[in-house]
Image (cartoon, rainbow, N blue to C red):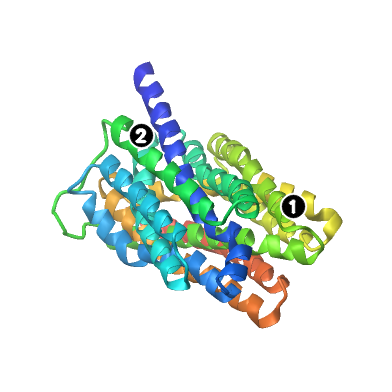
C-alpha cells in the first residue's frame, strides 16, 4: 500500500514536470508579441489569432484522441503529444511570416490536445476517490508554472537575443518531457479501458454533464489566457516597461502554483468545493479591476494568483463526477472538444476588441466577464448533477 502511494505521487511529479512544457510552449507567442509586431509587421488581431490557434486542433482532434486511448497506451500518446509540441515550436522558430507561425502553432496545438487529455486521465486513474482535487490542482498548476517561466525567460531571450530562441528553448523542454514520460511513466493498476473500438459508449447523462463541466473549465481558462495576453499591454499603457510589465503579471502565475495546491486541499478537506470556487471567482474579478490603478498593480497580481486562479484543480475534479471510470478516455475527449471550441476564439476576440478601441480596458473587461460566467456554469453543473444520475 505504501509503495503504491509513493508510486502515484512519483507519477504525479513526473507528469507535473512534463506538463510544464505545455504552458512554456504556449507562452512563447504572448511573450514575444512586441518583437513580432515590429519585425514581422503583425497586428494584435493576428497575434490573438496565433495565440488561439494553439487551441484550434482540439476542436477536431479531442474526440478522436479519446478513441485512440482504446488502442494505444496513455503514456505513449502523452509522449507523442510532447514531441508534436517540440516540432511545432521548432517550425515557429524559423518562421518569417504569419502563415509559418500559424502552421507551427497548429502543430503545437495537436500535441497539446493529445498530451492534455491523457495527462489528465492518468492522474484521474491514479487518484480517483483519493485526494483527487489536490492531485488535479498539482497537475494543472504545471500550466501556470510553465507560463510563468515563459513570461520571464521568453521575454528576456527576446529582448537580449532574438525572439526565435524562445521557441527553441520551449521545444527542447517538451522533447525532454516526452522522453521522461515514455521511459518512466506507469498507468494505474485499476485503470479501465472501454471496449468496443470506435463505438461511442458515453450515455446521454454523461455527455450532458461532461459538456457542462467542460464549460466551467473553458470559461475559466479563457479568462486566464486573455488576462495573460493583455494585462501586460494594460500595464505598459500605464507607464511600465515591457519586461517590468511581464514580471508583474508573472507574479500571479508563480503564486498560483502554490495557492492552487492549497486550494485543492481546502476543498478536499472541507468538502465545500463550490463555495471555494465562488469566492475565488469574485476575487479574480476584483483583482482584474485593480489592474488599472497603477499603485495597485502588484497587489492586483498577488490577489489574482493567490485566490483568483487557485480553484483550477477544484474545477478539473468535476470530470470525475461527469463520467464513469471506464469512459474516461472518451469522456476526456468530449470534455476537451468543448473546451477548445469555447477557448480558442477568446484571444482573437480580445485582440479584435483591442484593435477596435486601442484600449486594453476592453480585453480586460472581457476577461472579467469570462470569470463571472465560470461561476454561472459551475452552478449549472451542480443543478444538472442532481437530476442526471450516471
Q: Earlier in the sequence, mark 2 or mark 1?
A: 2
Q: Residue at x 63, y 54 (%)?
A: 278
Where in the figure is residue 174, as x and y percent of width and height?
41, 44
Element assignment for label 2:
helix
**How many C-alpha atoms fall within 10 Å of the one at disc 2: few (<14), some, or many (≥20)?**
some
Tag 2 and tag 1, C-beta contact below 8 Å: no
**Location of residue 190 by image quarter:** top left
Q: Residue furthest left?
A: 196
Which residue is depicted at the point 76% across and 53% down? 300
Q: Where in the figure is residue 101, as x and y percent of width and height?
A: 45, 66
User: Circle 1 sits on which residue?
Assistant: 244
The answer to whether one can see residue 58 in this image is: yes
Q: Nearer the viewer, residue 384 or 294?
A: 294
Secondary structure category for the residue under label 1: helix
Query: Of residues 101 and 40, which is closer to you in this image?
Result: 40
Is 143 placed above or below 241 here?
A: above
What residue sits right under mark 2 in the picture?
180
26 horizontally vs 362: left or right: left
Question: Which mark is on residue 125?
Answer: none
Q: Quadrant of the N terminus?
A: top left
Does 178 sit above or below residue 27?
Answer: above
Structural distance between the alpha carbons of marks 2 and 1: 34 Å
Q: Quadrant of residue 159 in the image?
A: bottom right
**Residue 162 in the figure: left or right of residue 215:** right
Q: Position of residue 147 (x, y in %)?
A: 56, 49
**For the view shown, which residue lies furthest in the top direction?**
2
Query: Which residue reaches farthest front?
Result: 161
Residue under the image location 32 percent in, 45 percent down: 78
Residue 208: in sight, yes or no?
no
Q: Nearer the viewer, residue 215 or 86?
A: 86
Amino acid at each position: 500500500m505504501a509503495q503504491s502511494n509513493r508510486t502515484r505521487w512519483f507519477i504525479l511529479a513526473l507528469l507535473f514536470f512534463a506538463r510544464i512544457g505545455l504552458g512554456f510552449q504556449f507562452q512563447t507567442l504572448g511573450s514575444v508579441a512586441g518583437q513580432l509586431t515590429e519585425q514581422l509587421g503583425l497586428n494584435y488581431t493576428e497575434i490573438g489569432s496565433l495565440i488561439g490557434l494553439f487551441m484550434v486542433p482540439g476542436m477536431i482532434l479531442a474526440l478522436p484522441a479519446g478513441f485512440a486511448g482504446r488502442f494505444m497506451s496513455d503514456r505513449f500518446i502523452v509522449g507523442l503529444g510532447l514531441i508534436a509540441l517540440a516540432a511545432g515550436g521548432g517550425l515557429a522558430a524559423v518562421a518569417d511570416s504569419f502563415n509559418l507561425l500559424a502552421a507551427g502553432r497548429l502543430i503545437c496545438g495537436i500535441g497539446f490536445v493529445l498530451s492534455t487529455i491523457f495527462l489528465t486521465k492518468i492522474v484521474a486513474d491514479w487518484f480517483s476517490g483519493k485526494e483527487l482535487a489536490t492531485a488535479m490542482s498539482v497537475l494543472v498548476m504545471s500550466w501556470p508554472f510553465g507560463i510563468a517561466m515563459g513570461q520571464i525567460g521568453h521575454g528576456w531571450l527576446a529582448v537580449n537575443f532574438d525572439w526565435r530562441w524562445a521557441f527553441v528553448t520551449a521545444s527542447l523542454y517538451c522533447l525532454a518531457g516526452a522522453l521522461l514520460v515514455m521511459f518512466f511513466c506507469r498507468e494505474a493498476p485499476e485503470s479501465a479501458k472501454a471496449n468496443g473500438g470506435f463505438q461511442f459508449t458515453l450515455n446521454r447523462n454523461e455527455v450532458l454533464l461532461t459538456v457542462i463541466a467542460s464549460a466551467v473549465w473553458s470559461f475559466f481558462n479563457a479568462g486566464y489566457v486573455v488576462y495573460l495576453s493583455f494585462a501586460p499591454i494594460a500595464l505598459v499603457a500605464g507607464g511600465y516597461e515591457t519586461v517590468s510589465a511581464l514580471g508583474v503579471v508573472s507574479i500571479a502565475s508563480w503564486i498560483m502554483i502554490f495557492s492552487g495546491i492549497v486550494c485543492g486541499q481546502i476543498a478536499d478537506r472541507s468538502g465545500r468545493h463550490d463555495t471555494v470556487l465562488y469566492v475565488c471567482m469574485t476575487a479574480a474579478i476584483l483583482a482584474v479591476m485593480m489592474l488599472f490603478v497603477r499603485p495597485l498593480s502588484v497587489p492586483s497580481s498577488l490577489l489574482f494568483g493567490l485566490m483568483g486562479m487557485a480553484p483550477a484543480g477544484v474545477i478539473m475534479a468535476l470530470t470525475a463526477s461527469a463520467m464513469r471510470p471506464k469512459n474516461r478516455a472518451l469522456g476526456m475527449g468530449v470534455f476537451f472538444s468543448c473546451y477548445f471550441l469555447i477557448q480558442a476564439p477568446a484571444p482573437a476576440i480580445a485582440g479584435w476588441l483591442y484593435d477596435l478601441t486601442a484600449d486594453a480596458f476592453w480585453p480586460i473587461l472581457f476577461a472579467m466577464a469570462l470569470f463571472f460566467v465560470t461561476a454561472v456554469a459551475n452552478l449549472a453543473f451542480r443543478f444538472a448533477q442532481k437530476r442526471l444520475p450516471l
